[in-house]
Image (cartoon, rainbow, N blue to C red):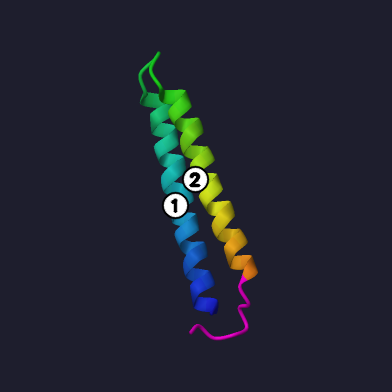
């Protein structure tokens, strides 16, 4: 079970680094006057929601029992 949690944390860290890089480049090199800022906000809201939901779902599972 510990392997799954560690794999999730590693994936989450990689996702956050990749997302931060993407947001930086969109903010820095995006076009003025288009939907750059709303796209960043929507992406952060959706990504944050998915992360919170997965953490909530993981907290509901009993990690002492084996997978079946």
Instruction: Pick whichever, 26 or 45, lies toward us.
Output: 45
For the point 58% across and 63% down, the residue is 57
**Which of labels 2 and 1 is toward the front?**
2
Whether pointer 2 and pointer 1 mark residues with C-beta atoms closer than 8 Å, the reply is yes
Please indicate whether residue 45 sits to the left or right of residue 26 in the image: right
Q: Which residue is mark 2?
A: 47
Residue sitting at the far top? 33
**Residue 5: x %, y % from top left:** 53, 71
Q: Residues within 10 Å of mark 2 (few under 14, many from 20)?
A: some
**Residue 21: x %, y % from top left:** 42, 40
**Residue 54: x %, y % from top left:** 54, 59
**Mark 2 residue element:** helix
Please indicate whether residue 66 sits to the left or right of residue 22 in the image: right
For the point 46% across and 48% down, the residue is 17
Closer to the chain start, of discs 2 and 1, is 1
For the point 46% across and 41% down, the residue is 20
Q: Which residue is mark 1?
A: 15
């Amino acid at each position: 079970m510990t392997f799954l949690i560690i794999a999730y944390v590693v994936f989450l860290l990689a996702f956050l680094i990749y997302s931060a890089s993407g947001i930086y480049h969109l903010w820095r090199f995006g076009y003025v006057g288009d939907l750059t800022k709303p796209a960043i906000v929507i992406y952060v809201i959706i990504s944050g929601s998915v992360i919170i939901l997965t953490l909530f779902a993981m907290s509901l599972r009993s990690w002492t029992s084996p997978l079946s």
